[in-house]
Amino acid sequence: ILNVEQSPQSLHVQEGDSTNFTCSFPSSNFYALHWYRWETAKSPEALFVMTLNGDEKKKGRISATLNTKEGYSYLYIKGSQPEDSATYLCAPDCTYSGAGSYQLTFGKGTKLSVIP
Amino acid sequence: DAGITQSPRYKITETGRQVTLMCHQTWSHSYMFWYRQDLGHGLRLIYYSAAADITDKGEVPDGYVVSRSKTENFPLTLESATRSQTSVYFCASSVTGGNSPLHFGNGTRLTVT
């Protein structure tokens, strides 16, 4: 069972603030890293799938970076809005060397609350 | 375009009963997955399937059975439900697996009394 850590567990920010959170995972056997956004009473929705060291992905005001050598990824939200309130999950696939295992290990998530 | 649907949305059953949770996707995705979500844990993989008639265990498979006779369906059966299986169950599908995103169903909240 992989150790996937997300920090912080939760945070509250004011509308308009920018914020970021971290996902740490084992650096060995890395294949891919997924980020999902999970709103209350809904199902998780994919934000990014990242595979290459140094990868940066962007979707609107949300962006993510990936460091596979040290085993971490950052998710950034610029100018947070109330509709960004959700739990953000990361899930690495790093079970088998050189190949995807299709077995994502989800972190417990970072719960973001944006205060209007 | 219905996407991926789970049924039922809510289910209450008694200890020892067999219960089947249904999952149907309309995208013809190769991969399908069952996860459970419990307080204090991240989503945990129960079983997954790479194609029709191909299934494999995930992190927490004990007490569950799956089948995949058709690409679009991936039912999850609890052969003899226990209280520890009270959880929210999510089905998901993806095009290729590890480096393509998961598409989740709306979940089934199961309570075992």
Image (spheres, coloured by chain):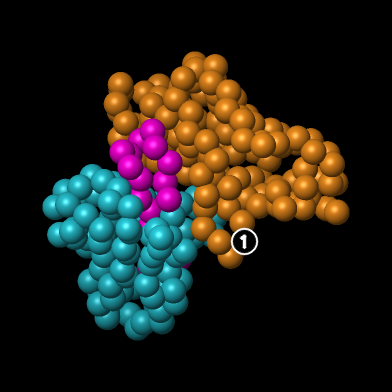
Chain colours: A orange, B cyan
The amino acid pointed to by label 1 is Thr
Could one spot residue A1 in this view of the protein?
no
- Start and end of the magenta stretch? B84-103
**Residue A63 in the image, given as x and y percentages of width and height:** 64, 31
Residue displayed at 46% across by 20% down: A52
**For residue A91, above or below residue B39:** above
**Residue A113 in the image, given as x and y percentages of width and height:** 75, 52
For mark 1, give the secondary structure: loop
Tell me which corner region of the image, top left, top right, bottom left or bottom right, holds residue A9: top right
Q: Is residue A77 left or right of residue B25?
A: right
Q: Quadrant of the C terminus of chain A?
A: bottom right
**For residue B83, above or below residue B27:** below
> Front-most of A50 and B84?
A50
In the picture of the structure, the residue carrying the numbered disc 1 is A40
**Residue B36 in the image, given as x and y percentages of width and height:** 41, 58
> Front-most of A56 and A98?
A56
